[in-house]
Structure formats: structure tokens, C-alpha cells
Amino acid sequence: MSEQNIVMTVAAGGKLSGQIRVPGDKSISHRAVMLGSLAEGVTEIHGFLEGEDPVATLQAFRAMGVRIEGPDKGHVVVHGVGLRGLNRPPRPLYLGNSGTSMRLLAGLLAAQPFDSTLTGDDSLSGRPMRRVTEPLAAMGAHIETSPSGTPPLKIRGRQGLQGISYQMPVASAQLKSALLLAGLYAEGTTCVVEPGPSRDHTERMLQGFGYTVQREEDRVCLQGGGTLEAMHIEVPGDISSAAFFMVGAAISEGSEILLQNVGVNPTRTGVIEILRQMGADITLENERSAGAEPVADIRVRGARLRGTAIQPHQVPLAIDEFPALFVAAACAEGETVLSGAGELRVKESDRIQVMADGLLELGIDVRPTEDGIVIQGGEPSGGTVDSHGDHRVAMAFAMAGLCAASPIVVRDCANVRTSFPGFVEHAWRLGMNIKETAW
Ligand code: S3P
């Protein structure tokens, strides 16, 4: 965790206007470094997210002997070592706040011939890992967690994993990806069956690297023993970062913004669907593709939002956007009900409780439930809220200022830089009256 504490202060009211490019997609940046490292040849990445999370992944591969140049303004050059070319890291790999780094690396490292240990910050050290270690154990991996199933992960080097067919209990792209990465090394076929669609960047990128992945409805499979061929990757802007400004513009009358070059992979666009359901005015322009991923410019105009019922099947497609969506609901007319979202309790913070506490502090009538929340829309008052070190909670509450009656102070915001370095500058550029104070 970052030593320095940061507070963001947002003036009440205002509107957003103008156009920006948000930084690169976090999920795709992680995968680009991972697969680039495992490929034969040199992979060039443009638009890499220089946030702490993907940089933690990059450092982990450097520690395993991969030569990586950059990041330099989003440009990274990865000198791939091939699937069998990683070296034993000389010390535990510290992954900061990054669940994606830890879970995906668990799958990959379980298949290496050397031992390794994965650690993280306080938040990551409290997150559940058995969802990954148990199916990996069924493939033949040896991974030790803490007694409560959390990090550190102690991975015993091992060859000869066996492919399995695994029905995932949760729609988790991290779990799916961990098993597919282990499957690259396993004997036979590894199949993962999803209870609902989760983001599919791993599958798309593996195919980009020339690896065959078969998908049939909810089942994705690959055979062990192939090779990855280096490629050129353009990382699109992160829709999860764009989502804060989508909500900010949607809740403030008279706003109009254009978010350029945002990834609009259909496994990620739940936030657009839910905001439209609430009456938001969102249009996609200039739809095109960046390699394996669809991208577009997203135009958002302020509109009166109304509460909505968010269905469980919509949850995985907007899994990281709920803090922002809760703020939209707090500024909408009427009731918003979410269920089937128990996963939110095991993210970087317990996002149901932490958001409910903050919204209550802002005078909003909100009731957390076991797997969701009920929010009565209104006008948030001002006040001080605590993000509990959760980057997305911090940025969501900053947006609440746009529809609040008086200023909002958000505490514990240092982790914003895990996913969105330059958030405050981007917000400024769109006309927000926001400042950050370090102490
Ligand atoms: C991610 C998957 C999601 C998401 C996380 C990034 C990924 O987690 O919340 O921020 O890159 O695979 P789950 O797959 O566990 O839901």
C-alpha cells in the first residue's frame, strides 16, 4: 500500500464538457505483459496503463528474468522468453493491490518448475484465493494459502499438470484466466465452464498470439503444449475508468463529453446498458477495432436519471462499475435495486458496505443487502467520506460532487493511481472543480 495519503475535495455542482482519452485498459495491460513475456519474439505494446497494478505485473516478469523496456508514455517492449523461459524469482513477488496479478500469476506459476511466493498489500492480503487454488490443485498444483484462504500464496514448482474441465462457481475472468494459463502447460485439454459471461480478454489475446482457443457457448477450452508468437498490441482506453466520467456527465444537467478510444468489448459494456436503462443519453461513435478488441468514442449528455432494477445477469458485465453506478442511483429519481452481486463484497474493499456507509454519510437513504443494495435517489448533501483505500470507491464519490448540495471530501485516495493515474487532471480537463491534497 502507498505510504502517502491523499484527500480529494470536490466542489458542489457544475457540469462536464469537452473530450478526453482515458488511460489504457487495466485488464488488457496485465495480459499483454504476461502473454508477451511467454511468447517467442518481441511484443510491442502501445497504450499500456502505467498504473501501479499493471506495473506490478511488469515488475514480476522482470523479476523472473524477462527483459522489458518501458513503460514510456504507454510504450512497452517485451522480449519474450517463451513458455519455458521464466526464471525462479529471487524473492517473493509483491503485487500491491492487484488481484488480477495475483490470481493470474497463481495459474501460471503453478505450472513452472520453480517455487515462488506471491504477496500483496493489506487489501489484497484479505481477498479470497481458494477459488483459484482449489481448481489448480485439481490440475495437480501445490499452492499454500493462509489458513483463511488468503495470500500469501506459496507455490511449489511442479511439472506435469493435468487438464481438467471445471464448472466455475462464480463468473470470474480472473479465475477463468488463471486456469487457462495453467492449461497452456497441462497435459490434454483444459476447459472452463462459466455460469455467465465474464470479460474475455485472455481468450481474445491468446488467439492474437496464435494460440487456438475453442469456445462453445459457455465453455472455453484449450490444449496444452502449444507456443505463443509475439504480436503488436494496441491497448484501448479502459471503460472502467471512462465509467466515472460517463456517470459524472449523466448526473449533471447541461453536460456533454466525448470519451475517445474506449474499449467496448461486449463483456465490459454493462455500465452503458445499465445507465441507459436509467435514462442516460449515451451514444457510441466511430466504432472500430484495435486488434482483437472493439473500441469506440463514447458521447454522454446530461439527462434526468431514474432508478432501476439491475438484474443478476447484468452484474459480471459491469462488475467494476458498481461504485460509480451507485452514485448515479443516488442522484436519480426513485429507487434502484441490485441483487446477485455478492462478489462486490470481496473486491478491493467490501464495495457494498463501503459505498453504503459513504452514501449514508451524504444523506442518501440506502440499504445494503447480503448480495446487493437498495438506494433511494435524491440529492446527496456534502460531507466527508472514506474510500477505505479502494480506488474505484474514491473516484465514484468524487463524481457525487457534481450532483451534491455542498462540497465532498474523499479520504484515503492514494490507490487511485493503481488504475487511473492522472484522474484529477482528466477531471479538471472536463471542467470539474476538484483538487487533491497529499499529506
Ligand atoms: C479482472 C476481472 C474482474 C475485475 C477485475 C479485473 C480481470 O475480477 O473485477 O478488476 O482483469 O480479469 P473477477 O474476474 O474476479 O470478477
Image (cartoon, rainbow, N blue to C red):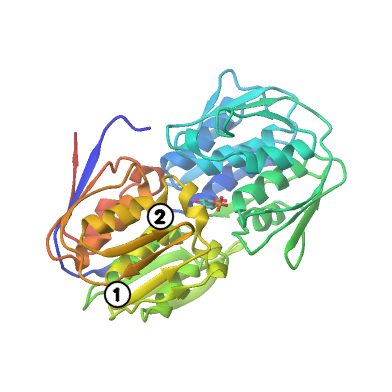
Q: Which mark is residue 332?
A: 1
Decide: is 265 above or below 393: below
Task: Estimate the x, y position of residue 21 in percent, counting from the top left.
Answer: 37, 61
Badge 1: few (under 14), some or many (20 or more) residues near its Cα, within 10 Å?
many
Residue at image point 61% right, 22% down: 89
Taking 404 as reference, is 148 left or right? right
Q: Quadrant of residue 179?
A: top right
Q: Quadrant of residue 109?
A: top right
Residue at image point 59% right, 59% down: 199
Q: Nearer the viewer, residue 303 or 292?
A: 303
Q: Provide the secondary structure element on which disc 2 rests.
A: helix
Residue 69 visible within the image: no
Q: Provide the secondary structure element on which disc 1 rests.
A: loop
Decide: is 78 above or below 249: above
The residue to which callout 2 is attached is 352
Depth check, mark 1 against mark 2: the one in front is 2
Disc 1 marks a residue whose amino acid type is Ala
Quarter of the rendering occupied by the C terminus: top left
Badge 2: few (under 14), some or many (20 or more) residues near its Cα, within 10 Å?
many
Task: Estimate the x, y position of residue 302 in percent, counting from the top left.
Answer: 27, 77
Q: Nearer the viewer, residue 27 or 287?
A: 27
Q: Quadrant of residue 242?
A: bottom left
Quarter of the rendering occupied by the N terminus: top left
Disc 2 marks a residue whose amino acid type is Ile
Decide: is 316 above or below 97: below
